Amino acid sequence: MLTEEEKDIIIQTMKPYHPVKIGVFRNNDQEIGLLYLLGKPYGIDAITLWDDLEENLNKKISFIDFDDVDVKRDYLQKEILENQEIFYCNEPD
């Protein structure tokens, strides 16, 4: 789905926000569907992070928190769960 270079750009861009888990559920030439779970409150910083990711990847990003997946509409939740690829995980044991 993503190139190793794109994954590295995403991880490095998100590092200051203490990512716990990062995944992708859609990727094409124009847009990346990115799933994330951050380890600290981020509030308004999420907008800055979103902008930084779009700029660094030169693509549009659909940005969805893992915690929000279960409250999305059923068809979207199904698409996300069936097509996700988690490429970074730093969850505590």
Image (spheres, rainbow, N blue to C red):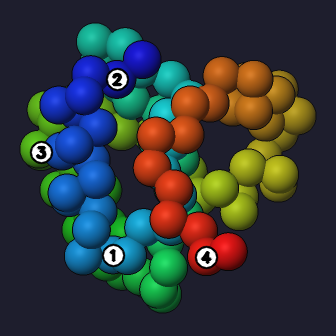
Which label is found at residue 92? Answer: 4
Amino acid beneath label 1: Tyr
| Residue drawn at x 36%, y 39% as measured from the top left | 61
Under circle 4, the secondary element is loop
How packed is label 1: few (under 14 Cα within 10 Å), some, or many (20 or more)?
Answer: some
| Residue drawn at x 37%, y 13% as measured from the top left | 28
Q: Nearer the viewer, residue 11 or 60?
A: 11
Amino acid beneath label 2: Leu
**Circles 3, 4 touching at the beta carbon (< 8 Å):** no
Under circle 2, the secondary element is loop
Place of residue 49 in the rendered image (x, y in percent of width and height, measured from the top left): 27, 64
Q: CA distance from mark 4 to mark 2?
A: 25 Å
Q: Nearer the viewer, residue 41 or 93?
A: 93
Dot placed on the residue nearer the N-terminal end, 4 or 2:
2
For mark 2, what is the residue?
Answer: 2
Place of residue 72 in the rendered image (x, y in percent of width and height, measured from the top left): 78, 46
Q: CA distance from mark 3 to mark 1?
A: 17 Å
Q: Locate residue 36 relative to residue 47 in the image: left or right.
A: right
How packed is label 3: few (under 14 Cα within 10 Å), some, or many (20 or more)?
Answer: few
Q: Locate residue 31 relative to residue 87 in the image: left or right.
A: left
Q: CA distance from mark 4 to mark 1?
A: 16 Å
Image vertical order of residue 15 relative to residue 5, above or below = below
| Residue drawn at x 42%, y 82% as measured from the top left | 42
| Residue drawn at x 11%, y 44% as measured from the top left | 56
Point out the frontmost of discs 4 and 2. Answer: 4
For mark 1, what is the residue?
Answer: 17
Which label is found at residue 55? Answer: 3
**Circles 4, 1 touching at the beta carbon (< 8 Å):** no
Dot placed on the residue nearer the N-terminal end, 2 or 1:
2
